[in-house]
Amino acid sequence: MSLKRVIKIGGSLLFEGDKINSTKIKKFCELIRPRDDILAIVCGGGIIARKYIQTLREFGVNESKCDMMGIYISRLNARLIIEGLGNASFPMALKTIEDLAKNMLFKKILVLGGLQPGQSTTSVALEVSEFLNADELLIMTDVEGIFNKDPKKFPDATKFDELTEIQLQNLILESSSNNQAAAGEYRIFDAVSLQILKRSNLNVRIFSGKDLTQLKKILDGNPSGIGTVIKSGQN
């Protein structure tokens, strides 16, 4: 029996610079469309959302309103995926867990962006996975997994092949700062995400989605050595 999965795709993976990467979106949707094991896809806002948010901050707008801007952009990204999937997808980006409950009955892939201020799309993906009783959450990002420090800043950063929940918690505490929950602030995992993970009995794999090769291997049943795996319930 195949695993029931939810996919979270970082918004920046849908763009090449500031241009929409339509070729990659088409390939992603072609890979997903024929499958019956993908329950939902959650889209992040990415660099485009962060640009909008930065502009709002220059206007003196508060963080809650900046969060809403990020949510709007993530839903636009979700629309790109919906149109790419065609009839395999429910035709609208869902906005609430209640929407999820109603529309899961259609047996279509459910696509959404952010849900509410103060919640990252990683937290959304975990909550959606929990609600749909998924076996696994696949988090596609622009790095190879979770590292002991930011690999974009430190060339000697080391990737973790596996992490327990306690190890992940310690990493989050070590990297915490005053802007941990600021709108648009990029974290693969944050404190809210961790709490959902702890209660969900869900396995999570974080990996690079830059060229879709790793996603295809995972879906084909060859995940060995790809990304970082967080085993649910392990301390």
Image (cartoon, helix red, strand yellow):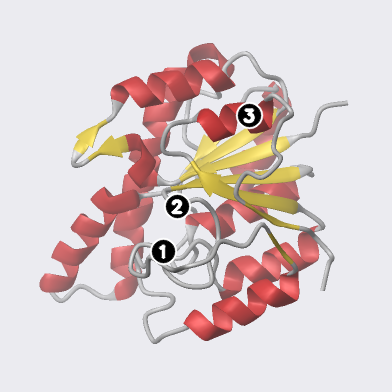
Give the residue displayed 62% in from the left and 62% down from the top.
Answer: 160
- Which disc is residue 143 wearing? 2
Kindly check if marks 1 and 2 are in contact, taking CB atoms under 8 A apart as contact. yes
Secondary structure of the residue carrying tag 2 is loop
| Residue where numbered disc 3 is placed | 217
Give the residue displayed 69% in from the left and 47% down from the top.
Answer: 129
**Residue 192 percent coordinates (x, y):** 59, 71
Distance of label 1 from label 3 (alpha carbons): 23 Å
The answer to which of marks 1 and 2 sits earlier in the sequence is: 2
Secondary structure of the residue carrying tag 3 is helix
- Compared to residue 222, the image places residue 6 above or below, namely below
Amino acid type shown at disc 2: Val
Kindly check if marks 3 and 2 are in contact, taking CB atoms under 8 A apart as contact. no
| Residue where numbered disc 1 is placed | 151
Residue 2 occupies quadrant: top right
Give the residue displayed 56% in from the left and 54% down from the top.
Answer: 124
Q: Tell whether 122 sits left or right of 220.
A: left
- Local packing at callout 2 (Cα closer than 10 Å; few below 14, some 14-19, many 20+) is some
Q: Nearer the viewer, residue 221 or 27?
A: 221
